Image (cartoon, rainbow, N blue to C red):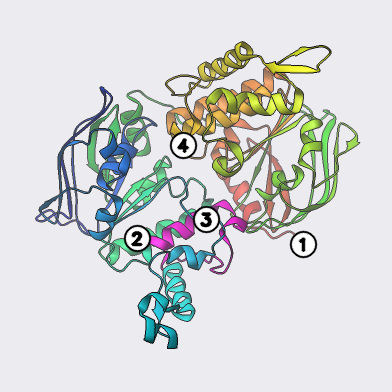
Amino acid sequence: MTNNVNPLLQMQNIKKDFFGNQVLTDINFTLGEGEVLGLCGENGAGKSTLMKILFGMDVIRETGGYSGDILIDGKKVEFNTPFDALEAGIGMVHQEFSLVPGFTATENILLNREPCKKNIVSEVFGDRLNTLDYKEMDRRSAAAIEKMGVAIDAKMVISDMPVGHKQFTEIARELSKDQLKLLILDEPTAVLTEKEAEALLESIRGMAARGISVIFITHRLHEILAVCDKVVVMRDGYVVRDVPTRETSVEDITKWMVGRDVQSAAVGEARTNDGGRTILSIKNLWVDMPGETVRDVSLDIREGEILGIGGLAGQGKLGIPNGVMGLYEAGGKVEFNGQEIPLNNPRKCLDSSLAFVSEDRREVGLLLDESLEWNVAFPAMQIQEKFLKKLLGGFIKWRDEKGIHQVTQKYIDELQIKCTSSKQKAKELSGGNQQKVCLAKAFALEPKFLFVSEPTRGIDVGAKALVLEALKQFNRESGVTVVMISSELEELRQTCDRIAIISGGRVAGILPAAASSEEFGLLMVSQVV
């Protein structure tokens, strides 16, 4: 565990500003060999900037560098590129994936470090013509995957993988590096469910036991308490606490993060709507989505309710909205408002006034290089011809720039999206704020029915309540029926009226939100036959 005599990492008096805006002020902390440090703070507290400095990210150098000192094993270092950090034994798994979609997991894990073997041609013309040693590649990737304790298909192409397995591929890539001394994990469990997250926490414990130090950034504060030796809390660019984990609690960390008491919400004011008419009926749904098991789901959703869908990893909860909305091949029968909706046809769903906020915001949810205005308004413009001015009976159309700006500003204000303006590019926002843009885009469609998958993924504790409240308000004030899919059972209990638990690709049972955690837990581990 901790080695206070000679810490592996020391960060001393780190300061950083972006164009005159001070984002880090006098940051100090140490990390011992084999120690796990939990780094906490709301979105915008400075966590990611600090880690970009430590990892030598280009954006730091391009914006004037930083002041202060970084010491590794007592020696001052300065990383100008991530390659310098990797050379020094520092690895980083970013919140957003950096994988080659057309490559397999094995090819990504060993990218640019592939073992090669000589052949007749390379014996004559040199090592550049060596061939890849696929047997050794398979062995090394299997060893890295085994270190995680989570089974993923090493031969599966990344573009076919569910989002959780992409995250594990990123982590396996770092674990495959022999010189690894320190691993930075930025929100690694945000896309994982309970079972996967627990496996990862066990993996972190294994890394620490082997002498690898870990900086663990997460908004799931109970994970900090479960796996970390100490916690460093940041707020507004300062370190406000640096304490051993055993001396703190979720409530303490939350208070330090936000500078105020945040009550851990009790179960929400769930409503019973037993007599409500069925607005969406799913019968015998199966979905062919990698990593998800949807075999035979039948579910009736009542008009005006918020229905939660929960369950363990891979049991099928994420596959349901992806199948209904046509993102993956599906079969069965879906009726909306008494009319059958053809499966495998996303446009028909959107035309029928259904909307979907995906769990995979970068691949499905956002136009990263476009402005917030374009992200929020474009789907409504394309599907419903909103925000368009028309001349000659629609023969000539042009964008209603004022209307686009107004609707975007409305949701920036309501969802408290942290941005410089509505013209800012989506890729420049933090992960949590990108998630809010995905919600705003769905709200702007003014649908009758909304699927929202992992709506608080990667969002800090202060913003979670805001997003959940926005969903409730959207449901109550606009009369929109909402189905919320989440790995966080407590969030479902706070937000939803009823909760369906999916196990083994089927509905294991539906309980009111006020039912006990134990009752939900029993459904999660049951296998429906």
Residue in the image at 67% along x and 58% along y: 526
Residue at the spot of label 1: 529
Judge whether residue 53 can be spotted in this image: yes
In the shown orientation, is residue 473 left or right of residue 52? right
| Mark with earlier residue (1, 4) | 4
Residue placed most toward the observer, 308 or 336: 336
The label shown at residue 473 is: none
> What type is the residue that disc 3 sits on?
Lys
**Magenta region:** 147-174
Residue in the image at 22% along x and 36% along y: 65
Residue at the spot of label 4: 431
> What type is the residue that disc 1 sits on?
Val
Q: Is residue 68 above or below residue 269?
A: below
Residue at the spot of label 2: 205
Give me the C-alpha separation between circle 1 and circle 4.
39 Å
Q: Nearer the viewer, mark 3 or mark 1?
A: 3
Query: Can you give x and y, in whole percent of width and height, for residue 512 in the image?
Result: 68, 37
Determine if the magenta segment contains residue 236. no
Give me the C-alpha separation between circle 4 and circle 3.
17 Å
